[in-house]
Structures are given as structure tokens and as C-alpha cells.
Image: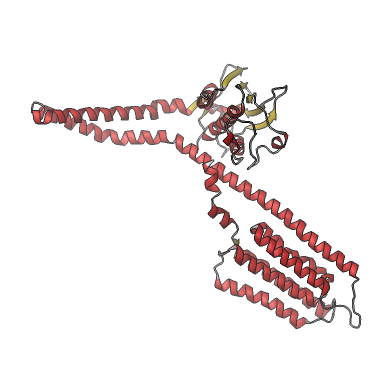
């Protein structure tokens, strides 16, 4: 899985945690507006007494930080994890100061202190998030014990019972932990899926480049043909003029033989890229299966290929890197875990084309079967190749590429004692026939065997 390793390099992992500065400044401007409106409403509409100037001083500090960061760094600047921790930590302390002067945890807006932790969980490494979470819990704990009275009607001091304050503390801490864990799981799954899709695209691109070599060979043969013909004419003329001279005869014979050798090489390249190109571009279903199975016949496992034809017209599609790689990966897995035999059964009629790949190996374990096809789910155990564990991207890539061609892919275990694994694939017949695909597929859709190159 070299492709997956490249997509998950250390630099990529580190850059993933660089939080965009503009995102934080916009969120902080929203907080500044919200805090200012709240202070104005409580002070001048409800007319509750509290230290208004100190509150506005804290709000102004947040606004000045935004102004400084906006002028100091470009809008596209991304913060490193330590810098993001410092900025988010400032938000926790600033909001803690506001809550200290407005009733502590009894303040209805005290739950907002968990927001910086949630942001950190979604975008920062776990170490920075743990530090920020510890700072938040410490601030909440101090606010439970030390704070100014809640702004209330003049002459009345609102005193909250210890039980209520304890309950609010538990609610804020549990909300912070639960929300952080939930966001961490969601963001981790999204990042894994993005990495897996990147690996899929790179794999497909590599396969397409391999198939494009035929076109490059044709271009090379065409471009080199003319100068080689000129060289051949010159060599013949030199042989006529100098062929009887012992000083030059061996050199001229060597030059002519090498010219003929170059011509044979170009002829083979031309044959590979022209005569065989049309033959290889169009693949009947039987040829497709044989091309997929052939590389895996030399590993001591018998591979049976059977095709059931309900109609006389065999599906003939155009070559596609995705479908060849996907089927090849599934057959490779089956051979890897089979004891003695792998079966590839195909069936086609006027409506559908079905392929079933089965083996007599241990099958899929129940915990893998429910997750199979997801990225980074390791494959079955019990294979002859101990390296088969891998990164769990092989089946995901195969399934993704095959589904892009219009296939329905189902993984299951067979029936009986030697159950083995069974993979069922099904395509609409119209998507598998090159003659019909161009007419029946919607505009913009890709033929199942057609390469993008």
C-alpha cells in the first residue's frame, strides 16, 4: 500500500492540524457582538447592576486580539497547534472573566465555555485538546467557588444553592466531554475517509497511466520511424560506395544490423500499440475475467472461472483501470485466504451482468463483515501471506472503484462448514456493453471500462 503511505505522510498529518486563522477571527467577532449585545441588554434594558466597564474591557481585549491578528497575518494564514492552543486558551480565560463578574456558573451563558474545547477537538491534536480541556475544567471549578453575584434586580442578591451550582458544574463538564468525544469521532472518520479517497484516486491514476503506455509507444514509434528510415537509406548508400573497402565493411555491417534491430523494435511497439490496441481496448467478459485471474494462477491455489450465458450476445466493454484493479484486488484477496480453490462465476442475460468471487478460506469474521468496505478496516486473518493485514484500504479502494462503474458490491460468507468468503457484484447490462453504453448512459456518465486518459 505504497499509495496509502504517501497520502498519509507525516507532513500531511501535521498540516491537517493547522487551523485557519480567519475561521477563529470570524468566530471571535461573532462572540464579541453577542457579548456586547448581552451586556447592553442586561445593563440598560433590564437595568441590572454589575461592573459594565470591566465587562466591556474584557470584550475589547478580544476585539483588539482580532485586530492584531488580522493585521499581523494574512487571511490564509494557518495556525500551528501550539498557536491555536494559545488563541483558544485566551478565549476560555476571557469568557471565564466575564462569567466571574456576572454570576459564575449560575449565568445562563456559562455553557458557552465548552465551545473552544469543541473547536479544538475538531481541528487539533489530542494533546492540545487535553490541555485546553483541563484549563476549561479548572476555570469552571474556580467559577463554581469564586464569582461575583449574578446581576439581578436592585436590592436583591440572587444566591444559588450549592446543590444547584454542583449540578451546573456537572452539566457543563459532562457536556464538554460528551461533545468533544462526539466531534472527535466524527472528524476522525471524516479525515480517514478523505485519506482513503485520496489513496483511491492515486491508485486509479496509476492504473490509468499504465494503460496509457500503449499510446506513448505508438507516438514514439511514429516519431522515430522517419529518422530511422533516413538512417537506413544512408547506410545502404554507404555500403554501395564503401562496401568493398576492408576498413569500413565490418563497421557498415554492424551499423546496418543495428538499424534493422531498431526497426524490429519499432515494429513490435507499433504492433503493440495499434494492432493490439483495438483488441485490448474492447474486452469481452470472458477476456476481462481471464486478464484479471491470470496473474494469480501461479500461487498454488486453483482458480475456476465459469460463465453462464442466458443470451448469445456476450457483453463487450471498453477497458477501464478501475474495474480491472477492483476485480484484481478481490481475486487477490480470495487467493490469499483460500485453502485450495477460488471460484469466479459470471452470469449475464439481456438485463444484468453478475460476477461472484468465492473461496474456501476462513471467511470474514463477524466484526469485519459489518464494517467491510470502510476505510482502514483490516482484512481477514488466517491468510497464507502474513502481510495481508495492511492498512485496510485494499477492499475500500476496490469497492469504491467498482461502485463508480455502476456495480453493486455485496460481501458475505458462504454456507456450509467450509464457508469461505463470497463477494457478489452486479452491473446493469446496458452499462457493460460498449455498443450500448454511449447511447444509454446519462450525459456526463462514464463508461464502465473507459479510461479517463
Against 197, residue 266 (above or below) is above
Residue at image position (59%, 31%) is 333
| Residue in the foreground of this view, choosing between 194 and 378 | 378
Image x and y of residue 346, in percent: 61, 22
Q: Which image quadrant is residue 227 in?
A: top left
Q: Residue furthest left?
A: 245
At horizontal 56% and vertical 40% (from top left) the residue drawn is 444
Figure coloring:
secondary structure
Which residue is painted at 71% across and 69% down in the image? 92
Residue 445 x, y percent position in the rendering: 57, 37
Q: In this view, does 70 lie to the left or right of 256?
A: right
Residue 86 falls in image quadrant: bottom right
**Is residue 45 toward the left or the right of residue 260 in the image?**
right
Q: Residue 358: x percent and y percent?
A: 64, 25
Q: In this view, does 446 lie above or below 177?
A: above
Residue 343 in view in this figure:
no
Report x, y in % for residue 211. Answer: 46, 34
Q: With respect to residue 42, does 9 lie above or below? A: above
Does residue 34 appear anywhere in the picture? Answer: yes
The residue lying toward the viewer, choosing from 258 and 402, is 258
Amino acid at each position: 500500500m505504497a499509495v496509502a503511505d504517501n497520502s498519509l505522510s507525516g507532513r500531511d498529518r501535521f498540516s491537517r492540524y493547522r487551523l485557519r486563522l480567519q475561521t477563529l477571527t470570524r468566530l471571535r467577532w461573532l462572540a464579541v457582538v453577542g457579548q456586547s449585545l448581552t451586556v447592553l441588554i442586561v445593563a440598560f434594558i433590564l437595568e441590572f447592576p454589575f461592573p459594565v466597564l470591566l465587562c466591556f474591557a474584557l470584550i475589547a481585549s478580544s476585539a483588539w486580539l482580532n485586530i492584531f491578528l488580522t493585521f499581523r497575518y494574512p487571511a490564509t494564514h494557518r495556525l500551528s497547534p501550539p498557536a491555536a492552543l494559545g488563541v483558544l486558551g485566551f478565549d476560555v480565560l476571557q469568557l471565564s472573566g466575564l462569567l466571574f463578574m456576572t454570576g459564575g456558573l449560575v449565568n445562563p451563558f456559562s455553557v458557552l465555555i465548552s465551545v473552544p474545547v469543541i473547536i479544538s477537538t475538531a481541528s487539533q491534536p489530542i494533546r492540545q485538546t487535553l490541555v485546553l480541556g483541563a484549563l476549561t475544567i479548572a476555570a469552571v471549578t474556580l467559577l463554581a467557588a469564586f464569582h461575583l453575584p449574578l446581576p439581578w434586580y436592585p436590592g436583591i442578591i440572587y444566591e444559588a444553592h450549592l446543590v444547584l451550582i454542583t449540578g451546573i458544574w456537572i452539566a457543563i463538564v459532562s457536556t464538554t466531554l460528551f461533545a468533544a468525544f462526539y466531534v472527535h469521532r466524527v472528524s476522525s472518520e471524516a479525515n480517514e475517509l478523505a485519506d482513503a479517497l485520496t489513496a483511491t484516486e492515486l491508485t486509479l491514476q496509476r492504473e490509468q497511466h499504465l494503460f496509457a503506455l500503449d499510446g506513448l509507444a505508438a507516438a514514439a514509434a511514429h516519431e522515430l520511424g522517419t529518422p530511422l528510415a533516413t538512417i537506413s537509406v544512408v547506410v545502404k548508400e554507404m555500403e554501395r560506395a564503401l562496401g568493398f573497402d576492408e576498413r569500413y565493411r565490418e563497421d557498415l555491417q554492424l551499423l546496418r544490423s543495428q538499424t534493422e534491430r531498431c526497426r524490429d523494435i519499432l515494429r513490435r511497439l507499433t504492433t503493440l500499440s495499434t494492432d493490439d490496441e483495438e483488441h485490448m481496448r474492447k474486452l469481452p467478459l470472458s477476456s476481462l475475467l481471464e486478464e484479471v485471474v491470470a496473474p494469480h494462477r501461479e500461487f498454488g491455489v486453483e482458480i475456476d472461472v465459469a460463465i453462464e450465458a442466458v443470451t448469445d450476445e456476450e457483453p463487450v466493454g471498453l477497458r477501464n483501470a478501475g474495474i480491472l484493479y477492483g476485480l484484481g484486488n478481490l481475486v487477490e484477496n480470495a487467493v490469499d485466504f483460500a485453502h485450495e480453490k477460488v471460484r469466479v462465476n459470471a452470469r449475464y442475460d439481456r438485463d444484468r451482468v453478475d460476477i461472484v468471487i468465492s473461496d474456501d478460506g476462513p471467511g470474514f469474521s463477524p466484526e469485519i463483515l459489518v464494517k467491510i468496505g470502510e476505510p482502514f478496516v483490516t482484512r481477514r486473518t488466517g491468510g497464507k501471506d502474513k502481510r495481508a493485514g495492511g492498512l485496510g484500504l485494499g477492499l475500500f479502494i476496490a469497492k469504491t472503484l467498482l461502485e463508480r462503474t455502476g456495480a453493486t458490491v455485496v460481501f458475505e460468507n458462504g454456507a456450509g462448514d467450509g464457508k469461505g468468503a463470497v463477494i457478489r457484484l452486479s452491473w446493469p447490462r446496458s452499462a457493460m456493453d460498449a455498443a450500448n453504453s454511449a447511447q444509454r448512459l446519462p450525459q456526463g456518465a462514464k463508461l464502465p471500462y473507459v479510461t479517463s486518459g
